[in-house]
Image: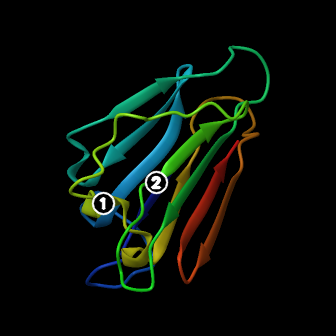
Amino acid sequence: MQAAFGRDGVPADGALDAGETDLIIGWDRGEWFIAPRGLRGRHAAPAATSNGLQRLTALIRVTGAGVCLPPSFADRDGAVVFAGLPADPFPEWLRPDAWDTLRVTARGADAPLESVRAVFAADGALLKLR
C-alpha cells in the first residue's frame, strides 16, 4: 500500500501521475518507505514488529511564515523512523502546503485491509497509514 501526495497539474484531471507526485509514503515487504519527487531516491525503515497491525504516523508542519519544521515519523510503538532525512536545507518534496491531491494504491490478491488518514491544517499535515 502506498499514498502519493502532490499537485494536480495541467490538465487538472483530478488524477495524480508520476510527474505530479512530490512524495510517496508506503509499506512494502516488511518495511516502511518514503520516496521523494522524481522517485529516484528511497528511504526505508524496517517494521517495529513482523506480526499484526502496522501503523506509521507522519507529522509535517509549516509555520505561519512558511518555514517547514523537521518532520516526525513514528511506527505503531512510537519508535522514530526515517531519522536520517535531511533537515537543512529542508526537502521541498516534504512541503504539505504544496499538495492538493492524494492517491492511494493497494496491491495484492487479498482484499485490501489498509487505510490512510490525512488531516491537512493551516500549519501542516498529519498522515496515518495502517
Q: Is residue 15 visible?
A: yes
> Which of these two is toward me, 107 or 32?
32
Q: N-terminal of the two: label 2 or label 1?
A: 2
* Residue corresponding to mark 2: 71
Which label number is shown at residue 24? none
Q: According to the image, what is the colour scheme of the structure? A: rainbow
Residue 50 picture location, percent across and down: 68, 14
Q: Is residue 2 visible?
A: no
Check if mark 2's residue and mark 1's residue have beta carbons within 8 Å: no
Near mark 1 (Cα within 10 A), the count class, few <14, some 14-19 or many ≥20, is: some
Closest to the camera, between mark 2 and mark 1, is 2
The answer to whether 24 is drawn above or below residue 67 in the figure is above
Q: Residue at x 25, y 45 (%)?
A: 39
Residue 61 picture location, percent across and down: 49, 67
> Which of these two is toward me, 82 or 19?
82
From the image, which quarter does the N terminus lie in?
top right
Q: Secondary structure beneath disc 1?
A: helix
Left or right for 112, reference 16: right
Q: Residue at x 34, y 43 (%)?
A: 35
Left or right for 98, reference 48: left
Left or right for 113, reference 46: right
What amino acid does circle 1 point to? Trp
The answer to whether 17 is drawn above or below residue 38 in the figure is below
* Residue corresponding to mark 1: 93
Q: Distance from label 2 to label 1 (Cα)?
A: 12 Å
Q: Quadrant of residue 55?
A: top right
User: Furthest-top residue in view?
Assistant: 50
Q: Residue at x 72, y 40 (%)?
A: 112
What amino acid does circle 2 point to? Pro
Residue 85 picture location, percent across and down: 33, 41
Residue 34 picture location, percent across and down: 41, 41
Q: Secondary structure beneath disc 2?
A: loop
